[in-house]
């Protein structure tokens, strides 16, 4: 069993930045994969960025060059730094972990990009 808790969402103007944090109940380096997804109103949940443990990161084309996923060993968190935010980045962002063949999700954190 893995519990994930996201934080850091909020309201930001276009061009601004936010940093999302996902705290895990198990050692994040024991996971097969950690990632961030998002779901906008009326749309399917989509992958934003992921880190298969021991492998290279993956980003959605729409966020490449603007978002960075990283793992903080000291805090046991996975973070998503989001820069140059756009209106279309507005969504609920979910932390995801794959552990022993099962997928786990956080409750989500709302990110709203609006002027």
Image: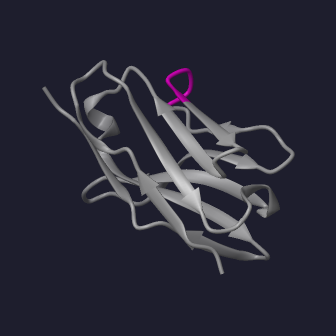
Magenta stretch in the rendered image: 62-67
Q: Quadrant of residue 115?
A: top left
- Tell me residue 99's x, y (percent): 74, 71
Q: Residue at x 45, y 42 (%)?
A: 20
x, y percentage for residue 47?
54, 50
Tell me, yes or no, whether the highlighted magenta stretch contains residue 95.
Answer: no
Between 61 and 11, the one lying in front of the other is 11
Residue drawn at point x = 47 percent, y = 62 percent: 5
Q: Assess whether residue 64 is covered by the magenta stretch.
A: yes
* Residue 60 appears in the figure: yes
Quadrant occupied by the N terminus: bottom right
**Depth check, front residue: 102 or 59:** 102
Judge whether 52 appears above or below 70 on screen: below
Question: Can you say whether 14 is above or below 70 in the image?
Answer: above
Residue 12, x across and y down, in percent: 24, 31
| Scheme by which the image is coloured | one colour
Left or right position of 78 against 17? right
């Amino acid at each position: 069993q893995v519990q994930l808790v996201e934080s850091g969402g909020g309201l930001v103007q276009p061009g601004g930045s936010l940093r999302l944090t996902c705290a895990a109940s198990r050692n994040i380096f024991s996971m097969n994969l950690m990632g961030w997804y998002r779901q906008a109103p009326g749309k399917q949940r989509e992958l934003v960025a992921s880190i298969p443990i021991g492998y290279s990161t993956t980003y959605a084309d729409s966020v490449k060059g603007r978002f960075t996923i990283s793992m903080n060993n000291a805090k046991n968190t996975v973070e998503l730094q989001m820069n140059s935010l756009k209106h279309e980045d507005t969504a609920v962002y979910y932390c995801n972990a794959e552990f022993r063949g099962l997928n786990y999700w956080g409750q989500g954190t709302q990110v709203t990009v609006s002027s």
